[in-house]
Image: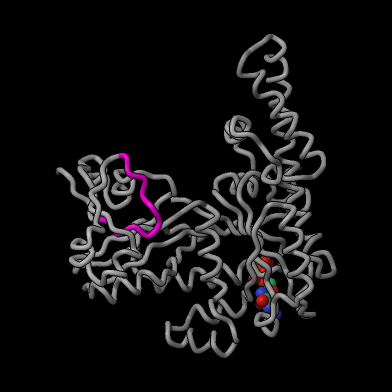
Amino acid sequence: ALTAGIVGLPNVGKSTLFNAITKAGAEAANYPFCTIDPNVGIVEVPDERLDKLTELVVPKKTVPTAFEFTDIAGIVKGASKGEGLGNKFLAHIREVDAICQVVRCFADENVTHVAGKVDPISDIEVINLELILADLESVEKRLQRVGKMAKQKDKDAMVEEPVLVKLRDAFEDEKPARSVEFTEEELRVVKGLHLLTIKPMLYVANVAEDEIANADENEYVQKVREFAKVDNAQVIVVCAKIEEEMAELDEEEKAMFLDELGIKESGLDQLVKAAYQLLGLATYFTAGVQEVRAWTFRKGMKAPQCAGVIHTDFERGFIRAETVSYDDLVANGSMASAKEAGKVRLEGKEYIVQDGDVMLFRFNV
Ligand code: GDP
């Protein structure tokens, strides 16, 4: 499964946030792919559409889809040179598909800041620089080899060399690969390099309890937002401490708590949604009387692959999929009415599944 790694300097609130994730996830149903890795936290993906479908179909049970976060501890200045747990840290980042960087935007004199004062941009730069330096090293190594091959007129090398040079220049300017513009062809080369700084980045601005309701007035948050624009990254705001408390509440209590705080959606829910988006994930539904359920797929996946998310047999024996969009189903009130209205399509092997599709797979066993 695709996973997002949680990183950040010491004392920014990573463990607090990760605790919130595992506590919230512990409540969730027993997922078959549930790992016992203590560094992996599984959370349900909040989706209002699932609630609506449950109302319509009245199934025996409803199962949301889930998402995994990986806690990656141990970044320090000098990680790219192998200091501290540096190498291990970078190896862990290599394995995740997106990075959520927790950034301290709360003051709290009782919590020591590693650099002596709260300065989110300089914190971000410390971490990003380690990632950039690690990428610079691998690109330089590769450039030596590819450069020689290009001189000998090796075709692939001649395509790759200018891309490597472009990357090296960006890294030397302390810019991450994700902020560089590439042509389609260049991007193909870049993807093969498995760089750290090409991974999508989400900054998680951790603000104080009393600032969450008006977080956009927080000057640290404003700075992070500005920085993220140039960095081609996204930002969400949370208060990790509140999330940790909220993770123990049931739905009703949680709603009341949010109301009191004056916020619409919990930071954790926003985090899950943002990470999901960042990874190019989407949701389709199955909606039978036994079970209404949400399933995660990667945008661009075709119907048989999506069927394979449920079971490999579904992919192998795929014949077709009865498909209706969520909006059409809701507008017609029931599957039967949607059928009458001609809104239920029979889709074949080449159909690219859309976010919100409600599907019934037909397959051979
Ligand atoms: P980590 O080192 O990044 O994992 O940071 P921790 O999650 O252990 O947090 C470090 C300290 O900051 C702990 O004492 C937390 O209680 C505190 N902390 C974390 N998040 C918040 C927050 O949102 N508000 C306040 N006031 N303190 C926080």
Residue 141 point in image, percent of width and height: 72, 27
Residue 340 point in image, percent of width and height: 18, 62
Q: Is residue 104 left or right of residue 325?
A: right
Where, by quadrant of the figure, is residue 30 drawn? Answer: bottom left
Q: Above or below — where is 227 with respect to 59? A: above
Q: Above or below — where is 217 with respect to 143? A: below
Q: Above or below — where is 148 with respect to 135? A: above
Which residues are the magenta region? 350-359
Residue at the spot x=42%, y=67% of the render? 44
What secondary structure predominates along the stretch shown in magenta? Answer: loop
Residue at the spot x=57%, y=55% of the render? 5
Residue 178 point in image, percent of width and height: 67, 45
Q: Is residue 53 left or right of residue 270?
A: left
**Direction top: furthest residue:** 152
**Residue 357 falls within the magenta-colored stretch:** yes
Residue at the spot x=68%, y=50% of the render? 85
Picture quarter with the C terminus: top left
Q: Above or below — where is 13 with respect to 6? A: below
**Residue 38 falls within the magenta-colored stretch:** no
**Direction front: furthest residue:** 341
- Nearest the eye: 353 or 316: 353
